[in-house]
Amino acid sequence: MELKQFLIMIRKKFVFIILIPILVSVITALGSVFFISPVYEASSTLYIISQNTVSEEDVTYNELLKNQQLVKDYRELIKSKQIVKTALEELKITDISPDELSKNITVTSKNDTRVLEISVKDTYPVRSMELSNKICEVFAKKSINITKIANVSIVDAAEVPKTPVKPKPLLYTSIAFLTSLCATIGVFYLFEILNETIKTSEDIGTYLELNVLGTIPSFKIK
C-alpha cells in the first residue's frame, strides 16, 4: 500500500480510529478507579553497622566486599518466613499469610550503602506503615540471634502514606489509548491490504496494470 492510499484509508476510517481508542480509554479509566483496590506503600530504613569496628583509613577492599555481602544477606533475611510470621503475629493480622506479605516487601540498598529501605505494600495505608515498622523492629531483635552481633539500627520509621502507589488511572489510560490506537490502525490497514475489491479507477491501474479508457459518472435521478 502506498502512502497516498494509506492516508486515504485513514481519512475514511478516521471516526472509528478515534472513537475506538477513546472508548477503550474510558473503560480502562473507569475500571482502574472503581474495580481495582488502591495499594499503599510505606517505607522505613535500617542501618547495618559493620561487624568490625574500623576507621575509614583502615577500610580495605575485602572489608567493603564483606559489607556488601552482609547487606545482601540481610535483604534476604528481612523477607524470611521467620521475620514475616513474627511481625504478623505481633500485629495480630490474620488475613495475610507470611508468603503473601513476603511478596509485598521490597528491600533495597540506597546507593550501594549499608542503609536498607524496607517498603511494604498493602491495601490499607495505616497497616502498611505498621507492617514496615514492625518488620524493622522484629528484624533488629532477631538479627542478634541470627548473626550473634547487634549491628542493626533503625534510622527512620515509616509514616502513613497519603496517596496510593497504584492503580495509576492516568498512566493506564494513556497506555490503553496509544495501544488501542495502534491496534485499530493496524487492523484497518490489514483489512485494506487483504481486500482486493476494485473500487476506483486508480485500483485498476494498480492491481490489474490496465489503462482506463473512460469512466461512467454516477448521478442521482430525481
Image: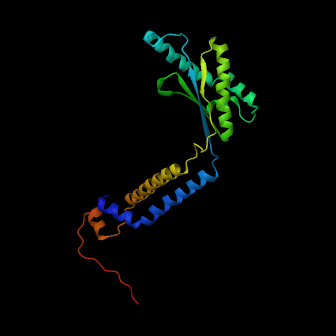
Q: Is residue 81 left or right of residue 17?
A: right
Q: Position of residue 61 (x, y in %)?
A: 43, 12
Q: Nearer the viewer, residue 117 or 186?
A: 117
Above/below status of 1 relative to 130: below
Above/below status of 148 relative to 37: above
- Residue that appears at 55% across and 25% down: 116
Q: Is residue 190 left or right of residue 31?
A: left
Q: Position of residue 173 (x, y in %)?
A: 52, 53
Above/below status of 51 relative to 107: above
**What residue occupies the far bottom of the structure in this picture?**
222
Q: Nearer the viewer, residue 3 or 90?
A: 90
Q: How is the image coloured?
A: rainbow
Q: Position of residue 2 (x, y in %)?
A: 29, 59
Q: Is residue 107 left or right of residue 198?
A: right
Q: Nearer the viewer, residue 15 or 22?
A: 22
Residue 148 location, quadrant: top right
Above/below status of 188 relative to 37: below
